[in-house]
Amino acid sequence: MLANPTFTFMLEIDAFDLEEFMTFLGETLEKFLDGEENFTYYAPIYAGDKITVYKKLLIS
């Protein structure tokens, strides 16, 4: 079964507990700015595929 292209967005959300991380930093989500998101599709995603998600958080 072929996955919907927006399926990767849900993987990205599940890969990182943002609220827990912001608490660790002593900040609240209200101060968080989502500046950019990128997805690189190398091939269609099918049921049973192994997918690796990398996250990069820049603090300025």
Image: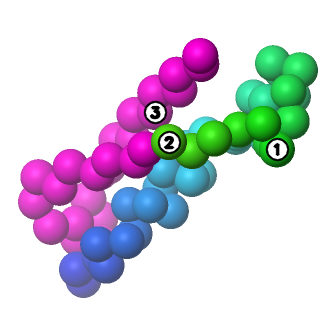
User: Does residue 12 appear left or right of residue 37 in this picture?
Assistant: right
In the rendered view, would you say 37 is above or below 28?
below
Q: Nearer the viewer, residue 23 or 28?
A: 28
What residue is pinned by disc 3? 55
Q: Position of residue 60 (x, y in %)?
A: 59, 16
> Which mark sits nearer the N-terminus, 1 or 3?
1
- The quadrant of the rendering that contains the N terminus is bottom left
Q: Position of residue 2 (x, y in %)?
A: 22, 80
How crowded is the residue under tag 2: few (<14 C-alpha within 10 Å), some, or many (20+)? few
Q: Nearer the viewer, residue 9 or 46?
A: 9
| The stretch drawn in magenta includes residue 55 | yes
Identified at 32% across, 47% down, the residue is 38
Of circles 1 and 3, the one toward us is 1
Asked if residue 20 can be seen in this view, the reply is: no
Q: Nearer the viewer, residue 48 or 4?
A: 4
Asked if residue 34 can be seen in this view, the reply is: yes
Residue 30 falls in image quadrant: top right
| The stretch drawn in magenta includes residue 27 | no
What residue is pinned by disc 1? 30
What residue is pinned by disc 2? 35
Identified at 79% across, 30% down, the residue is 22
Three-letter amino acid code at disc 2? Gly
Give how far apart the Cα atoms at labels 2 and 3 are: 13 Å
| Residue furthest to the left | 43
Q: Which stretch is magenta?
A: 36-60
